[in-house]
Image (cartoon, rainbow, N blue to C red):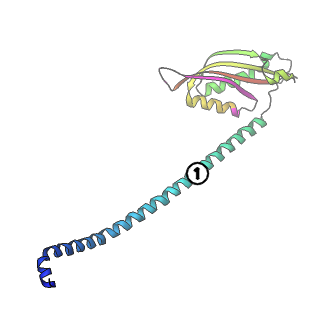
Amino acid sequence: MDIQSFFKQYRESLLFIALAIILCVAAVNQLKPKINDFISSKNEVTQKKASITQINSQLQMAQQQMARLEKARIASNMVNKTIFQPRSLSLDNEAGYSILFNDIFEMAKSNNIKTYSIQYEYNPTDDPFVAANKGYNVCLLKMKIIGGYKNFEDFLTDLYKYPYFVSISSYDIVPYYKDKNVLFIKLGIKVYMTSE
């Protein structure tokens, strides 16, 4: 079989194969920029993900640093606090504590905290200042108060800023069942006073 007869016999098949090759080459030429764009976009996304991971890591480290600084600031403020000394040491315990009590009640009031119950326990035996018997008097205020989250947070901030040494010995917080933004709080605050 010669070439001419071969071409005549398989002409349609050869044309189909040639057309298929041309179409494949054209398709590859058309898809090549899109494939390059896809690969470039994929690389860019990978780089941005790595960048985001690095930024998140830096943010986390910055937040941890801020938390450490805040703890140090609070500790520094606590070190700078003094124990209250009444002007007249001849006053009895209740009269001596009245300034501290009034300050705490004013802090609560100014932060829209409502106080509905207070109990006083003088010189509780489990307190280390009392156990050490070094000339300090302690009073545990057992308060039942009501307020919102932000009000309570502001009240605690004011307590931490208070120049005299006070400590929170206990707390129990329960949201009001009708309004979860309102808190019922049982709070134990110890106030300290020199007795010498």
Q: How many marks?
A: 1
Magenta stretch, residue numbers: 160-180
Is 196 covered by the magenta stretch? Answer: no
Residue 155 at x, y percent in the picture: 63, 29
Q: In the rendered image of this protein, does residue 160 appear above or below residue 100?
A: below
Disc 1 element: helix
Q: Quadrant of residue 18?
A: bottom left
Q: Quadrant of the N terminus?
A: bottom left
Q: In the rendered image of this protein, does residue 78 appear above or below residue 185?
A: below
Residue 77 at x, y percent in the picture: 74, 38
Q: Is residue 185 left or right of residue 96?
A: left
Q: Amino acid at mark 1?
A: Ser
Q: Quadrant of residue 23?
A: bottom left
Q: Quadrant of residue 86?
A: top right
Residue 33 at x, y percent in the picture: 34, 69
Most distant residue in the front direction: 1
Q: Nearer the viewer, residue 29 or 109?
A: 29
What residue is at 65 percent from the left and 19 percent from the top?
143
Q: Mark 1: give few (<14), some (14-19) or many (20+) Cα within 10 Å.
A: few
Q: Is residue 22 left or right of residue 64?
A: left
What residue is at 72 percent from the left and 27 percent from the top?
167
Q: Which residue is mark 1?
A: 57
